[in-house]
Amino acid sequence: MRELINRGEALESSGKALVVSVCAGFELSDIYDVGPSVTVTVDGDTTAAQRIAEEFMDYAWQTREFVSSPWTSATAAQAVEQAKAGELNAKKPLVLADNSDNPGGGAYGDATDLLRAMVAADLQNAAFHAIFDPAAVQAGIAIGVGNRGRIALGGKHAPEMGGGPLDVEAQVVSITSGHFRCYGPSFLGGGVWNSFGPSLMLRVGGIEVAVISRNCQGVDLAQLTSLGVDPLHCATIALKSSHHFRAAFEPIAREVLMVDGGGMLGSELLSRLRHVRRPIWPLDDIKL
């Protein structure tokens, strides 16, 4: 992608094109017109513009197997096992990024299987962002700050993908309006005010669990600090995000581990696509 953008900028600088716009395409889109594209804007010579566009897409096809940021996703059990093994002497947090329930990709944000595994392993000094569950927030508000009670967390939208409601005995650590300011390097940063609606932090064993009323992926440290958690001193931080978390969280992490928590964007996603045009690579073996 960077190579194609550089090539487009060089064409713009040379005057051969006014604008070259490269679109990588969104791999999670279950629509017919999915995939990469390029738009070339010129003044007059559309034949030359068409040739430039064809050359771009020929190159994109030739390099289709190149992956710039490869990862293999661990299961929730594997991720928690690694977190437990390193939590005692951790000087920096292990960041677990659950790509499968990333609200930024259209997931529901209330999958519970990763949190369930963390609770079962009795992780200590851990943080989890977040469970999207307005009803659970209201239940926590009714219990009150400093008090303990039972709350059913998440799993309400698609319990078959990422786990059903998780019933926990929790202490309500903090309750906020969800209004906070982000200073990180992500798209939520730069001093911008944001709100995730009424929010709370629950303490479940050794895990601080953020519960929010407006869905969003984890991208800024303030999403934790505004609820009273210091991410710099956590042994483990679990987030629901694919890429956007990296700018803020990777610099503070001892390691980042991608996790498939069984949510709707996980390993079973490709089998659920219905509207994508076929044949298309890599879903089909295309010979050209």
Image: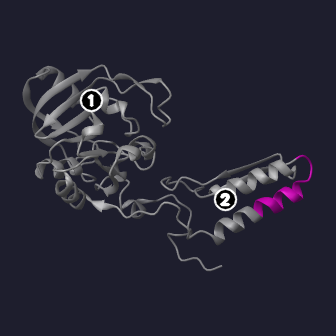
Q: Secondary structure at mark 1?
A: helix
Q: How is the image coloured?
A: one colour
- The image quarter containing residue 33 is bottom right
Q: Which residue is pictured at 87% across the width and 53% down the height?
A: 16
Taking depth in this image into account, of 215 and 96 the one nearest to the observer is: 96
The quarter of the picture where the N terminus appears is bottom right
Disc assigned to residue 62: none
Residue bearing the label numbered 2 = 3
Q: The disc labelled 2 sits on which kind of residue?
A: Glu
For mark 1, what is the residue? Answer: 134
Left or right: 286, with 215 as reference point: right
Q: Does 147 sit left or right of 6 as displayed?
A: left
> Within the magenta stretch, is there residue 15?
no
User: Which residues are drawn in magenta?
Assistant: 43-54
Say if residue 17 shows up in the picture: no
Query: Does dot 2 land on a helix, a strand or a loop?
Result: helix
Q: Are marks 2 and 1 in contact (CB under 8 Å)?
A: no
Name the residue nearer the viewer: 32 or 23: 23
**Which residue occupies 33% across, 54% down?**
255
Q: Answer few, some or many: residues within 10 Å of disc 1's Cα (few below 14, many 20 plus, some between 14 and 19).
A: some
In what quadrant of the picture does the C terminus appear? bottom right
Most common SS among magenta residues: helix
Which residue type does callout 1 highlight?
A: Pro
Image coordinates for residue 132, horizontal then vertical, percent: 29, 36
Query: In the image, residue 206 lies at what x, y percent?
Result: 13, 41
> Of callouts 2 and 1, which one flags the residue occurring earlier in the amino acid sequence?
2
